Image (cartoon, grey):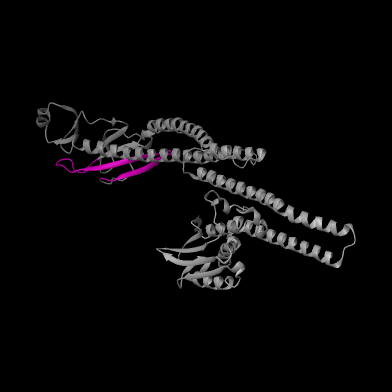
Amino acid sequence: MKNWSIRAKITLWFAAILLVMVGISIFTVLFVSNQVIQKTIRDGLVNTVERNVDEIEYYADLEELQASADVNHFLSYAGGFLKIDDDFLDQVNEVYTALYQSSGGLLYGEDPVAGALAQLRFIDGQIQSVKINGLTYYVFDRELSRQGLEHLWLRGVVAETQGSRQMSDISHLSLIVLPSLFLLALAGGYILAGKMLRPVQKISDAAARIESGGDLKQRIQLGPGKDELHQLADRFNEMFSRLDKAFAAQRQFTSDASHELRTPAAVILAQCELSLEAERTPEEYADALRVIQRQGKRMSKLIGDMLDFARLEQQAESYTREPVDFSELVSDLCDDMALIGERGICLEHREISHVQVLGNRALLSRLLTNLISNAYRYGKENGHIWVELKAEGGEVVLTVADDGIGIPEAEQEKIFRRFYQVDSSRTNAGIGLGLSMAREIARFHGGTLTVQSGDGRTVFTLRLLSQ
């Protein structure tokens, strides 16, 4: 059974449960039918006896008896005569009715069990059951109370087997109809199981195609629907999307790393080969070591930045979030970076107090550091940098502006790409990851980072939800 298909297992379990239900249904139908039939037999017995009570009359002399034209039977009793109409029969619908004396003597009618009921005492208006020769009989007695009929009883008798023909018909019908319904339901269940499991087969086929072809851009197409299997397919598609993005990021990381590390590695190797070609003076060796050190630091910074960027992209959950006093963070950072004073550039800042956001303090510090460093890098001699923090509605707005070289409109979105630099003449000033990292940090916090440049002024704007 372990090697059976899910469809076969579902059908088997369905068949087992259905078989139990059919068995219970057959038992219930037969049991209830038998109870109903037995009640019908008893009710028929009572109705027959009650009806026949009125069919017996007493007459004191023959003249009265002869005046009745419809007399069919008469008996001599207690100095008079008993009239029994022709409607009073010995047996009607297998119900036997007989007239007894209170002493147990049979006056008229038939005892179906050859006198075996003569010893059964009379109980007025109550059904008794008695078993004779393994067969149960229902007995119903009525005492006759009209004038002249004293000490007479009317007794009706019927066997419980009166309904055997009905029970036999019901049994045969049940044994035909219910098994037929079982087979129909089983076939329907097998078809329904196949239909319900068809999406699972599609999911399996799609996963197999992706595995064999290595194409994570393929998706599972089940059509419209919101049931559990469609939800499962959606989760698989989301997983494939994340895997595709992760592999794309890995490929991009490898490509970027190899591209960016090629130049400093080549410089280091060239400097080493040049230094080893011949004897050099101590000053020349010192210069070579400084070049190697500078390129090594560049490589180390590049690798660190790239790892941080990849971690932020793929493992953002590793960064915790907590309430951060953004006003204090901006103020402290601007005070520190204002001391740089590179190329005579003046850093000014203005912020409102007690502005809080929910985020990661280290990442927010890095975002602002990257923006200010970028402003320093591309600012003009004796220029300015303006940092402003304000609240607008439910948002916190941070702007970093400078009056540097500006950014052409066609380049304003490209600057957020990894390793992209507008001014190629300054490639040694940075590695082109600062703004990419800044925008990724903004996205991590559910915010946006945009840029506008023109009229001698470049403004980076960060928008975050306030706490």
Q: Is 82 situated left or right of 13 in this image? A: left
Task: Give me the residue at 52% from left, 50% from top.
Answer: 409
Q: Can you give x and y, in whole percent of width and height, for residue 170 in the image?
A: 40, 32
Task: Give me the residue at 53% from left, 61% from top.
Answer: 403
Instruction: Report the number of numbered marks.
Output: 0
Location of the C terminus (image quadrant) = bottom left
Task: Give me the residue at 81% from left, 58% from top.
Answer: 271
Q: Is 115 situated left or right of 233 in this image? A: left
Which quadrant of the structure image shows residue 13?
Answer: top right
Predominant secondary structure, magenta span: strand
Q: Can you give x and y, in whole percent of width and height, for residue 348 in the image?
A: 51, 70
Answer yes or no: is residue 115 visible: no
Indicate whether residue 149 is drawn in magenta: yes
Indicate whether residue 333 is drawn in magenta: no
Q: Is 107 situated left or right of 8 in this image? A: left
Q: Can you give x and y, in whole percent of width and height, for residue 59 in the image?
A: 13, 35
- Identify which residue, 330 or 80, lies in the foreground: 330
- Compared with 329, 149 (above or below) is above
Q: Can you give x and y, in whole percent of width and height, for residue 29 in the image?
A: 41, 38
- Identify which residue, 100 or 201, lies in the foreground: 201
- In the displayed orientation, state which residue is furthest to the front: 381
- Identify which residue, 413 or 360, lies in the foreground: 413
Answer yes or no: is residue 139 visible: yes
Magenta-highlighted residues: 125-153
- Compared with 330, 194 (above or below) is above
Location of the N terminus (image quadrant) = top right
Q: Is 440 situated left or right of 161 in this image? A: right
